[in-house]
Image: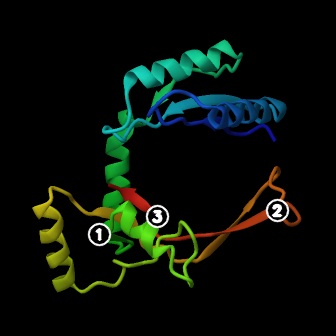
Amino acid sequence: MTHGNGRYAPSPSGDLHLGNLRTAVLAEAWARATGRGFRLRIDDIDAARSSEISADRQLEDLEAVGVSWDGAVARQSDTLERYEVALDRLVEDGLVYECYCSRKDIAEASRAPHAVPGRYPGTCRELTEAQREQKREELAAVGRVPALRLRAQVTEWSVREVFSAEAVDGWYTGDVDDMVLRR
């Protein structure tokens, strides 16, 4: 395999921790072992939690332990226009809906006996327009805006996986839910 690049995309919301370091080292090692380049992209679009100081410290820490990347470090915030174009297309195709749930609401819903822990239960997926308007007003009253979620068309997806102990014949199948596209 020699096409494409491997990548590592940390979120600069704090210092590099052991899990991030492990991911970066494995991603670089796999890219190099398969004859591909290795790129780094800072996922800095969460303005409330991301900081330039954290990004700089993480890059310094990666360099200090010998992780190296090819080319300039990309920043997700530099490509926001591309995300808006893609999001607009998904909205036009009816594949996006507003979600009014807080993280706490979702955590509490996942405690129900029939719920899958950590999975979004679809609370806002099929609301009527009148219900949506009421929810928008409730959020506006507390200074919040709804998140936008992808209306997933499947409940599971399979990917080729080399490292997972859960893979069967080189394939891993995982659950898919309506992930947040924008908060």
The residue closer to the viewer here, 65 or 158, is 65
Which residue is at 38% across, 33% downward? 50
* Secondary structure type for disc 3: loop
* Secondary structure type for disc 1: strand
- CB contact under 8 Å: marks 3 and 2: no
Identify the residue under disc 3.
179
Image quadrant for the C terminus? bottom left
Q: First in sequence: mark 1 or mark 3?
A: 1
Q: How is the image coloured?
A: rainbow
- Give amino acid for label 2: Ala
Residues at marks 1 and 3, CA–CA distance in whole angstroms: 11 Å
Identify the residue under disc 2.
167
Query: In which image quadrant can residue 108 be found?
Result: bottom left
Residues at marks 1 and 2, CA–CA distance in whole angstroms: 34 Å
Query: In which image quadrant can residue 96 be found?
Result: bottom left
Residues at marks 3 and 2, CA–CA distance in whole angstroms: 23 Å
Which residue is at 29% across, 69% downward? 98
Which residue is at 31% across, 51% downward? 84
Identify the residue under disc 1.
98
Badge 2: residue crowd in 10 Å (few <14, some 14–19, many ≥20): some
In the image: residue 157, left or right of residue 52: right
Answer above or below: position of 130 versus 80.
below
In the image: residue 142, left or right of residue 36: left
Give the percent coordinates (x, y) of residue 158: 71, 67
